[in-house]
Image (cartoon, rainbow, N blue to C red):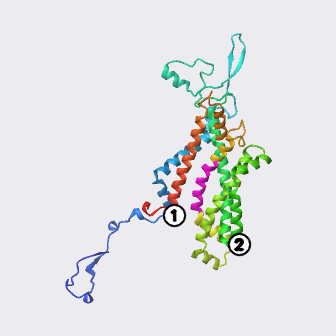
Amino acid sequence: MKKKMSKTPVNAPAENYQPVKEDFRFLSQQDITVDRNFASQSYWRGVAVHYFHNRRAVIGLIIVSLLIIFAVFGPMMSGYSYDEIVKVETVSSKGKVRMKPATMIAPRIPALHELLTGEEYDDAFKDEVFLFGTDDVGRDLWTRTWYGARVSLLIAFITIFIDMIIGMSYGLISGYFGGMVDNVMQRFVEVANSIPRLVIVSVLAIFMAKGMGLVVVALLLTEWIGMSKIARAEMLKIKEQEYVLASRTLGAGNGHIIFKEILPNTIGPIITQVMFSIPTAIFTEAFLSFVGVGIMLPQCSVGTLIEDGFNNITTLPYQILPPIIVLALLMLGFNFVGDGLREALAPKLEDM
């Protein structure tokens, strides 16, 4: 309400002041303003607003989104499958018809070449478009690159999702019960974390066939440890809060308190850890496939494509570029997204 001038003398004692009706008036609805900058909003809406104000995080989200779109729909654009050898009918000088594979064709777009030079390609594949070229056996690298990105992303998402469930449950239980339970569980974590990943892969390669299964198991055995440490740290910080004590007083069981009361309040740091673990899983899969214990030909992933390009780098120098660029963009994009989520979920005071 807005105050008007009172009829009481200015120098009158305060205890003698008697408010009258003319001292006040009601404000109209038009006079009331709302501070929209600090209007009440939900937690996740605040996270979204803070995230999309981060330019680097938005760039990372755009990169990851585009790569996922191309990984899903890219192989469909060429009309070839990832293991198909592109062939065309040719007629020899003796009149015999034979199928010629499209081996070692550099990246090209015939229509663009004709537009720029005014000349057509003088070969059997003059009507074929190969944006990334073909490999040494005649397979389209555009299709193989995006199919390989799809396989790498699928492996990373599946393994990290399972690792999140295992690590999150392990860390929350360890931190909640504490004492002897926590000591035993953390000693197991320390032992598991001290074993080099290469040793685990070597042992698995003895008992398992090379391929996607070996990569998934190797990632499942190693990537959950970081999740468990984050979950345990959050549990130790939160379990003494008043709402946990209130739930325990009202008779809630341990399972209800851990997964219904505490888990929703620890999901932010865990999501951030997941976003940082995805590029680690992609790189691990690429490394295992590169050294020959991961995805096996003719099936492909980013790692197998890099290995194949490295083996042919002297004859087909263009072959290694697409998978390397895709791997670099995946690593960069997911790290940008992880940094943005970390700042949005726990913003600093100067960023508010």
First to last magenta residue range = 267-281
Q: Residue at x 54, y 47 (%)?
A: 333
Numbered disc in front, either 2 or 1: 2
> Is residue 16 left or right of 274 when viewed as pictured?
left
* Front in this rendered view, residue 153 or 7: 153
User: Residue 266 occupies which quadrant of the picture?
Assistant: bottom right
- Residue that extends furthest to the bottom in the rendered view of this protein: 16
Q: How many marks?
A: 2
Please report whichever mark, 2 or 1, sits nearer to the chain's N-terminal start: 1
The quadrant of the rendering that contains the N terminus is bottom left
Depth order, front residue of 191/325: 191
Quarter of the rendering containing residue 268: bottom right
Q: What type is the residue that disc 1 sits on?
A: Tyr
Q: Give the residue drawn at x 69%, y 41%.
A: 291
Outermost right residue: 207
Q: How much space separates mark 2 and mark 1, taking CA atoms?
A: 36 Å
> Which label was assigned to residue 115?
none
Closer to the camera in the image, 116 or 210: 210
178 sits left or right of 52 in the view: right
Magenta: main secondary structure: helix
The residue carrying mark 1 is 43
Residue depicted at x 68% and y 44%: 288
Camera-nearest residue between 75 and 182: 182
Taking the spot 46% from the left edge, 53% from the top edge, the residue there is 54
Residue 131 lies, in percent from the top left, at 57, 30
Q: Which residue is mark 2?
A: 180
Q: Position of residue 227 (x, y in %)?
A: 64, 59
